[in-house]
Image: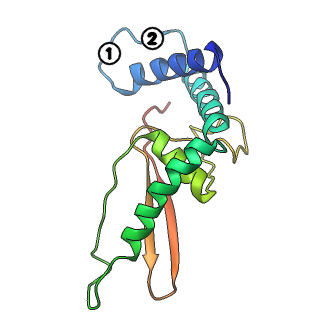
Amino acid sequence: VIKGPGGSLMKVLADTMFFSRATGGIEDVFLPDATLDDVYNAVQWDNYIRSVDEMDNPQFVSRGAVLADAILGALDSRDEGDDYDSLVTIFAGHDSDIHAIAAALGLRWNLGPPYNRFGDCAECVVTPPGSGMHFINDFESGKVGMSYVYPVYLTD
């Protein structure tokens, strides 16, 4: 686990650079001379640090196990005759909850541009604001699928 001011400072810098631009309408963005590449490089470093801290962390794995159990329970709950294509359960949480679920289930993903600035970084589990996990239980095949959905806020 990364302790000390380095990881926290990187998070504050990256978040402030990103959010001051992503929210729109702010005339005085943080570090106005920073390019879009600078912003996404900082965000990628923040995501890397968070992935190192959280993905194999027993505390996150145990928290994720509880969340994963609730998700799997919701995916398995249906009554005979239900139209399971129309059943929906929504769980709300934060990026740390997504990391916890991913850690517990051993999930990793690699987002494309603009979030991935380091090439193939499958261990950099990026969780942009507004992102989420979409689980589907295919009762006919007996398989559960997961898609990771996310918005892109800043573009050239």
Name the amino acid, label 1.
Ile
Image coords of residue 8 (percent x, y): 57, 18
Q: Residue at x 41, y 40 (%)?
A: 94
Task: Residue under label 1, please give it.
Answer: 26
**In the displayed structure, does residue 96 sit left or right of residue 83?**
right
Q: State the residue in front, 139 or 121.
A: 139
Q: Residue at x 45, y 68 (%)?
A: 72
Image coords of residue 115 (percent x, y): 57, 38
Name the amino acid, label 2.
Phe
- Callout 2: few (<14), some (14-19), or many (20+) C-alpha neighbours within 10 Å? some
Task: Residue under label 2, please give it.
Answer: 30
Q: Residue at x 60, y 50 (%)?
A: 103
Separation of residues labelled 2 and 1 (CA atoms): 9 Å
- Callout 1: few (<14), some (14-19), or many (20+) C-alpha neighbours within 10 Å? few
Residue 125 visible within the image: no
**In the displayed structure, does residue 126 sit left or right of residue 83?**
right
As drawn, 144 above or below 83: above
Image coords of residue 118 (percent x, y): 71, 36
Q: State the residue in front, 34 or 72.
A: 72
Residue 57 visible within the image: yes
How did the renderer colour the structure? Answer: rainbow
Q: State the residue in front, 64 or 41.
A: 64
As drawn, 125 above or below 2: below
Instruction: State the SS at label 1.
Output: loop
Residue 99, by quadrant, is top right
Q: Residue at x 29, y 19 (%)?
A: 25
Image coords of residue 56 (percent x, y): 67, 44
